[in-house]
């Protein structure tokens, strides 16, 4: 039977079926090509079905080739390839490969890097690669694409000779090969071979600064603090289990890159000491700059990098009152400076009858960070020297001497008391005095001064740090730093009405008009007293004479003129060694007719030698324990009172 076109009907049916079969094959070929393109990348060249894998690798983009040779990518969990329905992939091998991959993920943190020695590998029949290979090394490519060249055959015309199933198999094999290549995974003999884990980029060099900011010494003036802030941000772990002193820097020991004077340990704030140094080290002899010397430059720089310390000096005429102030915080710990000082020296004239109670109160106020280095008394003249407890090892023996300025030596209400010692290589002398009273007795007060500098026999056993600049007739020339404070009793040469009018007209800080009439300022300018001494600028009201418990000056019948009787002066062998930071009075303490006067100083400290008599950490232990116990008891009582107040409060409901 023929058709209108002239073809037999059965021929037309065969032709139609042949055309439909060809269309199906073309459609499947297009799908396989799209899948191969999707696996290989959108910018890659189109793959020809049947092309050998060795030729297929040549079609990779140039960027991918460069990444295969140079760059290394942190391995990521692979995605399961999208398989065509006609593809036949061994599900058992796939599950086994997934189990190995899961175990690797559980053992390796994707956020960290590790060396090739720590990566997991399973023995493979293929020969091991030499050297440190990246996931995309050529040998890895050969292993990942380990197959026979005859596995894929191409027809001369580039078309598939097999059926649709063969075409799907070849397309899925190419897709799997490229997918494994991009993921850095391949199969050799059906067993997975895990590639070496490499960092995504070159690791930054390890920094040598391993010191901890929290383990720094408590001194606030340390200039190397910035180095340890960098460490605290990055939080490097402890990289060395044992650190020695700074002399081991050249032997590969990690140390602070900015401070070679001392080694900051990662496990202690103390400087590590080698065993051989302990065997040979002696504190009885030493040189000025010897490494390891107790009083030398290395230890000094560790505690005081700027080689300056803070000193608090105060004087107070207590008028012999038995009653002590309830709180000494405003006196010893003023709020103006942010930090406490390294040393506290307090001199008292006409002290309270119970001297021990006064020292306990000082210890209670300063707290456990300070210890009483030494205290002395001359009649009712008291002096107490407190120092930070970690600095007592750098003090020499403490010596003291007294001078009586009254005609009758048994009456010890007027005179002087001196305490001296050497701290590192700097010698200190502290003198507290009570000179003759009386508005017109200026010459008597100058005689008291001259007798003191001649009769005060210091130092005794501790050697002079610079004997060539000393004088046997003046004790103040035999020390590097001298602080003289007390009730000097110098007055204002003006009547009471004039002084009151000046005080009422000017604010508290402007007292320049009063100082014009000050006897001590006038005598010091002439050089008749306190030769070589200086005094900080005065910006506080006269410290004498007040009504007890009030802020008003003398209202009795005597109507004494307010005056600056309580003073602090200083001198140094070397220029600019002492810098006055603050000079003021404490108006809140009103138990006496005098207000306490204090001064804060920054004092330069020099390294010294170990061949001086050392105090060996001696301090008043009993006083320390009593003061700390009282401080703790006071805090407990305060908390209990606060708790009782909260519990006894009454709530009213409106």
Image (tube, rainbow, N blue to C red):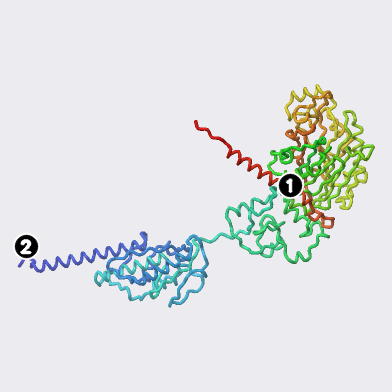
Location of residue 82 in the rendering, given as x and y in whole percent from the top left corner: 33, 64
| Residue nearer the viewer, 40 or 480 | 480
Q: Which residue is mark 2?
A: 4
Q: Residue at x 46, y 66 (%)?
A: 69
Residue for point 56% across, 35% down: 650
Disc 1: which residue:
627
Q: Residue furthest left?
A: 1
Q: Earlier in the sequence, mark 2 or mark 1?
A: 2
Whether residue 408 is situated above or below residue 259 in the rendered picture: above
Q: Nearer the viewer, residue 198 or 407?
A: 407
Local packing at callout 2 (Cα closer than 10 Å; few below 14, some 14-19, many 20+) is few
How busy is the neighbourhood of tag 1: few (under 14 within 10 Å), some, or many (20 plus)?
many
- In the image, residue 165 sits, relative to residue 413, either above or below, namely below
Q: Nearer the viewer, mark 2 or mark 1?
A: 1
Q: Is residue 528 above or below residue 294?
A: above
* Corner quadrant of residue 59: bottom left
Residue 559 visible in the picture: yes
Looking at the rendered image, the quarter that the N terminus falls into is: bottom left
Determine the CA span between mark 2 and mark 1. Answer: 126 Å
Give the left or right position of residue 509, taking residue 63 as reference: right
Q: Position of residue 253 (x, y in %)?
A: 66, 63
Q: Secondary structure at mark 1?
A: helix
Residue 76 position in % (x across, y down) = 43, 62
Residue at disc 2, secondary structure: loop
Instruction: Evaluate whether residue 66 shows in this view.
Output: no
Q: Is residue 161 above or below residue 330?
A: below
Disc number placed over residue 144 in the picture, else none: none
Seen at 77% across and 24% down, the residue is: 502
Q: Is residue 53 left or right of residue 122?
A: left
Image position, residue 583 (x, y; %): 76, 37
Query: Do tag 2 and tag 1 residues touch (Cβ < 8 Å)?
Result: no
């Amino acid at each position: 039977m023929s058709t209108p076109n002239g073809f037999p009907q059965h021929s037309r049916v065969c032709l139609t079926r042949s055309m439909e079969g060809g269309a199906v094959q073309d459609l499947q070929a297009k799908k396989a090509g799209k899948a191969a393109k999707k696996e290989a990348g959108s910018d890659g060249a189109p793959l020809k079905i049947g092309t050998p894998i060795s030729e297929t690798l040549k079609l990779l983009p140039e960027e991918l080739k460069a990444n295969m040779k140079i760059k290394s990518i942190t391995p990521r969990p692979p995605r399961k390839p999208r398989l065509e329905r006609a593809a036949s992939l061994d599900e058992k091998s796939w599950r086994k490969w997934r189990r190995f991959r899961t175990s690797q993920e559980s053992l390796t943190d994707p956020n960290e890097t590790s060396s090739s020695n720590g990566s997991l590998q399973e023995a493979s029949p293929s020969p091991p690669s030499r050297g440190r290979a990246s996931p995309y090394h050529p040998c890895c490519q050969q292993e990942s694409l380990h197959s026979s060249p005859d596995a894929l055959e191409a027809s001369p015309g580039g078309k598939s000779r097999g059926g649709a199933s063969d075409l799907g198999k070849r397309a899925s094999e190419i897709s799997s090969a490229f997918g494994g290549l991009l993921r850095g995974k391949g199969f050799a003999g059906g067993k997975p071979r895990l590639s070496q884990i490499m960092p995504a980029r070159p690791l930054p060099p390890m920094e040598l600064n391993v010191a901890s900011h929290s383990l720094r010494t408590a001194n606030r003036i340390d200039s190397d603090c910035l180095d340890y802030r960098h460490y605290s941000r990055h939080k490097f772990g402890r990289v060395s289990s044992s650190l020695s002193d700074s002399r081991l820097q050249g032997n590969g020991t990690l140390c602070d890159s900015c401070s070679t004077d001392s080694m900051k340990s990662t496990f202690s704030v103390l400087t590590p000491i080698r065993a051989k140094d302990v065997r040979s080290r002696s504190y009885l002899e030493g040189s000025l700059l010897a490494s390891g010397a107790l009083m030398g430059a290395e230890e000094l720089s560790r505690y005081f990098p700027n080689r300056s310390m803070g000193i608090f000096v105060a004087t107070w005429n207590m008028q012999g009152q038995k009653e002590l102030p309830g709180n000494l915080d405003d006196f010893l710990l003023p709020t103006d400076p942010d930090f406490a000082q390294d040393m506290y020296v307090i001199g008292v004239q006409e002290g309270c009858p119970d001297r021990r109670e006064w020292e306990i109160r000082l210890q209670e106020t300063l707290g456990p960070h300070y210890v009483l280095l030494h205290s002395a008394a001359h009649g009712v003249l008291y002096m107490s020297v407190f120092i930070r407890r970690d600095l007592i090892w750098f003090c020499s023996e403490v010596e003291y001497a007294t001078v009586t300025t009254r005609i009758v030596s048994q009456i010890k209400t007027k005179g002087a008391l001196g305490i001296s010692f050497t701290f590192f290589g700097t010698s200190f002398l502290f003198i507290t005095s009570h000179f003759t009273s009386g508005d017109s007795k200026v010459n008597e007060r100058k005689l008291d001064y001259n007798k003191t500098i001649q009769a005060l026999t210091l130092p005794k056993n501790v050697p002079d740090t610079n004997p060539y600049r000393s004088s046997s007739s003046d004790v103040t020339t035999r020390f590097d730093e001298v602080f003289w404070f007390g009730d000097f009793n110098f007055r204002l040469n003006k009547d009471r009405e004039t002084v009151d009018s000046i005080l009422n007209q000017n604010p508290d800080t402007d007292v320049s008009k009063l100082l014009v009439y000050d006897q001590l300022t006038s005598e010091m300018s002439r050089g008749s007293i306190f030769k070589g001494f200086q005094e900080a600028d005065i910006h506080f009201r006269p410290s004498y004479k007040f009504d007890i418990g009030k802020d008003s000056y003398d209202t009795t019948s005597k109507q004494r003129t307010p005056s600056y009787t309580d003073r602090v002066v200083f001198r140094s062998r070397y220029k600019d060694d002492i810098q006055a930071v603050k000079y003021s009075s404490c108006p809140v303490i009103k138990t006496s007719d005098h207000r306490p006067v204090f001064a804060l100083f920054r004092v330069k400290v020099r390294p010294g030698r170990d061949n001086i008599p050392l105090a060996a950490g001696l301090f008043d232990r009993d006083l320390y324990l009593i003061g700390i116990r009282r401080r703790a008891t006071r805090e407990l009582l305060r908390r209990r009172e606060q708790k009782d107040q909260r519990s006894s409060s009454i709530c009213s409901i409106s």
